[in-house]
């Protein structure tokens, strides 16, 4: 029995009728751009998160870009983030010609090291992009205190954090902005590219609404230079269907994580969930010696696995010009060598999970 890392087909089949109807409605209405499907989803997702505003975007990457533009980040403004994320977290800083710098992470959670952040944050720091890696939020209350004190814009990269919480608050509560991706494999994924920005600030919301749609103030009047970064209505309609199931799916992910926690061999490092966190398990990440050998063994045995992420951003060829060397962020580098994501999706059966555990335990 083959077990993939994620199974988007199983997810579609579990809600096929609802999805097919939603897609057909958009086509019947030929309401492809903006309009009620987008408005409905934006309203429902804002409500789900407990934030004032949500603006759909064409991807998580464009959401991050817009957040930095709306925040007024310019050439040579320093923006801090972590090195162990998807490249988009850094790319958005480059789009606005910001000065990209990193803060290393904690080894147990892979999340930003707040002690190091305290040292690194200065009056030159203009923004901080916190990453809710694998679906877990760091201590956002403490981070917000730090950014408030230094007048730093706080952006949450919540691309992996649909369903996550810190002290009962979802992304968007602590940050000036939270940016989501609806890439198909995410906890809430559409059928193509998509994303959104959420904020509680009405001035930021107005700015983003304008930026996301060619800087429009009316159909052909453009007060500022904007972008075509809109979320398609088809994707919004799909997301609106899936949003109703999100909490149930996150609960299943958490249940699967519990099963792995219990049934994997003692020597295997498991995810650590902080006391105040609700981990949404976008990924279930283990830490092992001989990671690459385990990976080939699992693949040979039909078990999907992957590394998130094998090369820390500061060591990516694209960022060579920043001049970081191996050793610059040693915890992130160490994690990159031992982490492995194993199958995690709501539809995973207990039988499949047992098989994943058996194979991993056998290998050791
Ligand atoms: C997926 C992801 C993004 C980018 O989202 P896209 O929708 O693919 O542009 C950004 N940051 C993180 C942490 C992600 O996981």
Image (cartoon, rainbow, N blue to C red):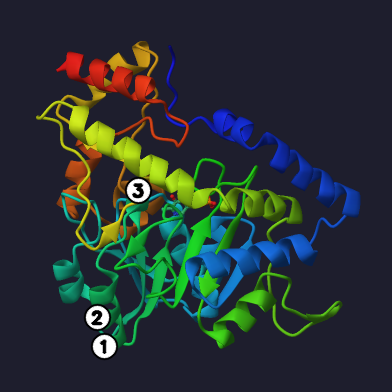
Q: Residue at x 66, y 75 (%)?
A: 209
Q: Secondary structure at mark 3?
A: helix
For residue 145, side relative to residue 346 (left or right): left
Whether residue 348 appears in this view of the structure is: yes
The circle drawn on residue 8 is none
Compared across the picture, whether 361 is left or right of 224 comes to: left
Which quadrant holds the C terminus?
top left
Query: For mark 1, does the 10 Å Cα neighbourhood hold few (<14), some (14 to 19), or many (20 or more) residues?
Result: few
Q: Are marks 3 and 2 in contact (CB under 8 Å)?
A: no
Q: Quadrant of residue 175?
A: bottom left
Helix, strand or loop at mark 2: helix
- 239 in relation to 296, above or below: below
Across and down, in percent, residue 229 comes to 67, 63
Q: Of label 3 and label 2, which has the lower sequence position? A: 3
Quadrant assignment, res 225: bottom right
Residue 262: quarter of image: top left
CA separation in Å, label 3 and label 2: 23 Å
Residue under label 2, please give it. 146
Position in image of residue 268 (x %, y %): 15, 31
Q: Residue at horizontal 35%, vertical 48%? A: 134
107 with respect to 324 (left or right)? left
In this view, the mark in front (3 or 2): 3
Q: CA distance from mark 3 to mark 1?
A: 28 Å
CB of mark 1 within 8 Å of CB of mark 2? yes
Q: Residue at x 56, y 46 (%)?
A: 189
Q: Is residue 308 visible?
A: no
Report which residue position mark 1 lands on.
149
Q: Nearer the viewer, residue 196 or 117?
A: 196
Distance Cα–Cα, label 1 vs label 2 = 5 Å
The residue mark sitting in front, 3 or 1, is 3
Q: Determine which residue is flagged by label 3.
A: 134
Reading the chain from its start, which is encountered first: label 3 or label 1? 3
């Amino acid at each position: 029995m083959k077990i993939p890392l994620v199974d988007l087909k199983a997810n579609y089949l579990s809600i096929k009728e609802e999805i097919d109807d939603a897609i057909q409605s958009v086509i019947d209405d030929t309401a492809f751009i903006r309009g009620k499907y987008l408005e409905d989803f934006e309203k429902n997702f804002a409500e789900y998160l407990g934030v004032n505003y949500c603006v759909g975007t064409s991807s998580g990457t464009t959401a991050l870009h817009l957040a930095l533009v709306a925040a007024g980040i310019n050439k040579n403004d320093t923006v801090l983030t972590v090195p162990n994320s998807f490249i988009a977290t850094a790319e958005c800083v480059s789009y606005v010609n910001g000065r990209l710098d990193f803060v290393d992470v904690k080894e147990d959670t892979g999340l930003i090291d707040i002690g190091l952040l305290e040292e690194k944050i200065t009056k030159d720091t203009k923004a901080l992009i916190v990453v809710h890696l694998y679906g877990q939020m760091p201590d956002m209350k403490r981070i917000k205190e730090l950014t408030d004190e230094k007048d730093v814009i706080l952006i949450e990269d919540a691309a992996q954090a649909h369903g996550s919480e810190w002290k009962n608050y979802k992304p968007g509560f602590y940050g000036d902005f939270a940016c989501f991706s609806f890439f198909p494999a995410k906890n809430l994924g559409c059928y193509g590219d998509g994303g959104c920005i959420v904020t509680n600030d009405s001035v930021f919301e107005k700015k983003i609404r304008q930026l996301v749609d060619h800087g429009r103030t009316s159909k052909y009047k453009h007060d500022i230079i904007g972008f075509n970064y809109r979320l398609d209505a088809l994707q919004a309609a799909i997301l609106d269907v899936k949003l109703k199931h999100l909490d149930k799916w996150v609960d299943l992910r958490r249940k699967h994580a519990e099963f792995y926690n219990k049934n994997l061999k003692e020597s295997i490092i498991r995810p650590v969930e902080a006391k105040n966190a609700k981990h949404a398990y976008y990924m279930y990440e283990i830490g092992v010696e001989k990671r690459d050998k385990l990976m080939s063994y699992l693949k040979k045995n039909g078990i999907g696995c992957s590394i998130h992420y094998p090369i820390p951003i500061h060591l990516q060829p694209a960022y060579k010009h920043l001049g970081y060397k191996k050793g610059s962020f040693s915890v992130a580098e160490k994690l990159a060598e031992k982490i492995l994501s194993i199958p995690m999706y709501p539809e995973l059966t207990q039988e499949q999970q047992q098989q994943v555990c058996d194979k991993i335990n056998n290998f050791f």
